[in-house]
Image (spheres, rainbow, N blue to C red):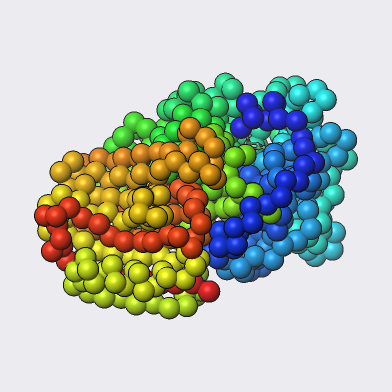
Amino acid sequence: MLAALTSCIAQKNSNSPISDNSTAARPVLHFTPEKNWINDPNGMFFYQGEYHLFYQYNPYGEKWGHMSWGHAVSKDLITWEHLPIALEEEDKVMIFSGSAVVDHQNTSGFGTGNVPPIVAIYTAYDAKSGFQSQSIAYSNDKGRTFTKYDQNPVIDLKKADFRDPKVFWYQADQKWIMTVSLSQEKKVQFYSSKDLKKWDLMSEFGPAGVTAGIWECPDLFQLDYNNESVWVLGVNLGTHSIAGGSGLQYFLGDFDGKSFKVNKSLTKEPLNFIEYGKDFYAAVVWNGTPKETKERKWLGWMNNWEYADKVPYYGWRGSMSVPRTLSLEKKDGFFYLKQEPVKEIDNYKKKSIVKSEATIEQANKLLSSFTKSDSLSFSTVFTVNPSTIHDFLRFNIKSKGSSIINFSYNKNTNELILERRKSDKYVNSKQFPTIQKIKLDHSDKEFQVRIIVDKYSMEVFTHDGKYVFTNLFFAPNSVLNVSFETSKQDQKLVFKSVGLDTYL
Ligand code: FRU
């Protein structure tokens, strides 16, 4: 986020990492860099069985600065191979966020031989002029190494806040489309190009929806639901998102190859969010994944600009959310987006158990026997029938008796509530403690909750992926305990089922 960027002097510092051995262990299901600072995911494309993930990276330190594109590849979105930096800051021009495409028809002419070039489209931030312009770079070795185009920039408005190009191939018109933000103006611009080099402005969208915070990392893509097709415009909000600070809003509507128009009749609410937690930002979808219009794959930077440089440095600072499948759902005539953790996670299960008709006591026994190890990486899935609850059901992670983070369903108010306490020893920020509440507009016969805990994050997926809460939390894993809690009235509560998985 640019407030942070302009005031941030790039640093080559190296404080010693937190040496709490139990917490220093890496997350199992989440991408982390080998070392140093990361923020947004960038340039995500899928090609020949490989998911490429580039990311905003400071090669020299634990704070934002010297932004370059780090790079990793994966066959299953869980195990990542770290590769050399793909695009580096040069002559005080940083490489900000952007995207990458496989240029199958060699429209750019960058291709040599039979291998299609991979073209990265990114924002070049010139620290000398303060301007942001769009530049490209190409790869002739399937994305391993990149050469910056010698006639960069390809779009230059001589503006300070013009960034984060997301490009995709628009089959109907045989052209490339770029979605890019005018951050301070709270606008998204759409450009088109036949060759990725010469770009024409087609239209603008915005301001709309939440306009209090700056707009960053926009993304436009199509999703189908049975025979209906909807266009999704995602806009990341630097501040003022639903849980406070950074987050993401989306619009549903139509795109005719030139402009995007919101179709208000598609959604129930005037403002739409897909994430209700504080730590899911700069998310954009992978280009070129299988069954693209049915479902997309994506992940977000698991952090928030409100305190991103204050979260613990473990030798690295920052991680990505669990990779997710994003799809369209329709209920009572209205569409919404839903997210589920990718299925590949299941291949990493070490121990699994499922118990049906479990009492609270039995469920807690199960939890404590599975989470005794000194590092927490597990997921639990439970199904309950709200009509059997009198007051509330809570899933609580505690340290020395006090709650660190918890998720509850409150029957009296029909709310989903996520509470995170302050964590002074680890994150010195007034914005870190949070209460996130969603009021449900109906009561379910039963609902399922899946919670993934992986060292220092808790991701809650519920109501078939309609509500997701992604949050970091910090405390030594060795003193954490996990349990379900209820009021006295609910001591006899019986889960329809409770499952637990631990991971490698
Ligand atoms: C979003 C962002 C982008 C920018 C990048 C810089 O988190 O501010 O708008 O390109 O980070 O690191």
- Ligand 1's image quarter is top right
Location of the N terminus by quadrant is: top right
Q: Horizontally, is 325 left or right of 107 in the view?
A: left
User: Residue 491 appears in which quarter of the rendering?
Assistant: bottom left
Q: Nearer the viewer, residue 458 or 150?
A: 458
Residue 502 appears in the picture as rendered = yes
- Residue 427 lies, in percent from the top left, at 54, 41
The correct choice, above or below, for 126 with respect to 348 in the image is above
- Residue 356 lies, in percent from the top left, at 22, 74
Q: In the image, what residue occupies the spot 57% across and 21% down?
A: 185
The correct choice, above or below, for 79 with respect to 287 in the image is below
Q: In the image, what residue occupies the spot 30% across and 44% down?
A: 417
- Residue 48 lies, in percent from the top left, at 66, 67
The correct choice, above or below, for 383 with respect to 40 in the image is below
Q: Horizontally, is 3 left or right of 400 in the view?
A: right
- Residue 178 lies, in percent from the top left, at 63, 38
Residue 252 appears in the picture as rendered = no
User: Residue 362 appears in which quarter of the rendering?
Assistant: bottom left
Q: Horizontally, is 170 left or right of 275 in the view?
A: right
Q: Nearer the viewer, residue 163 or 226?
A: 163
